[in-house]
Image: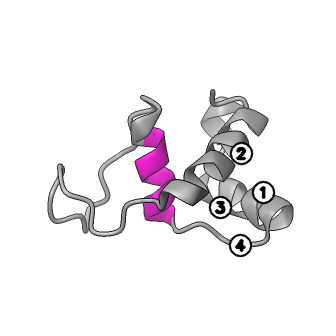
Amino acid sequence: MINMVTYKHIQDYVKKTYGYVPKSCWIAHVKELNGLNPKIAPNRRSATIRKYPCPQERQEDIRKAFAHFGLL
């Protein structure tokens, strides 16, 4: 299921489990932090600077969603 997990799946899981919907840029940031190499969005201005990095307090929830889907 690794290739079939979308950001929407992760957002739905986090919403159901933790009560909020993470921004897609947060998901990409946490992917990057965990070595999962997200694709660079076409509208991203800089490959090194994040305009909206994932807040520290939300990162663990997203990591748990990755683990749930077998990404980690």
- Kindly identify which residue carries mark 4: 20
First in sequence, mark 2 or 1: give its number: 1
Residue 18 placement (x, y as % from top left): 79, 63
Inter-mark Cα distance, 2 to 4: 13 Å
| Residue depicted at x 57% and y 58% | 57
Q: Contact, CB < 8 Å: mark 2 with mark 1?
A: yes
What's the CA distance linking mark 4 and mark 3?
13 Å
Q: Disc 2 or 4, which lies upstream in sequence?
A: 4
Residue annotated with mark 2: 65
Q: Amino acid at mark 2?
A: Ala
Residue most toward the front? 57
When asked about the image quadrant of residue 44, the answer is: bottom left
Callout 1 amino acid: Tyr
Q: Indicate the amino acid at tag 3.
A: Lys
Q: Which mark is residue 13?
A: 1
Element type at marker 2?
A: helix
Q: Earlier in the sequence, mark 1 or mark 4?
A: 1
User: Magenta stretch?
Assistant: 24-31
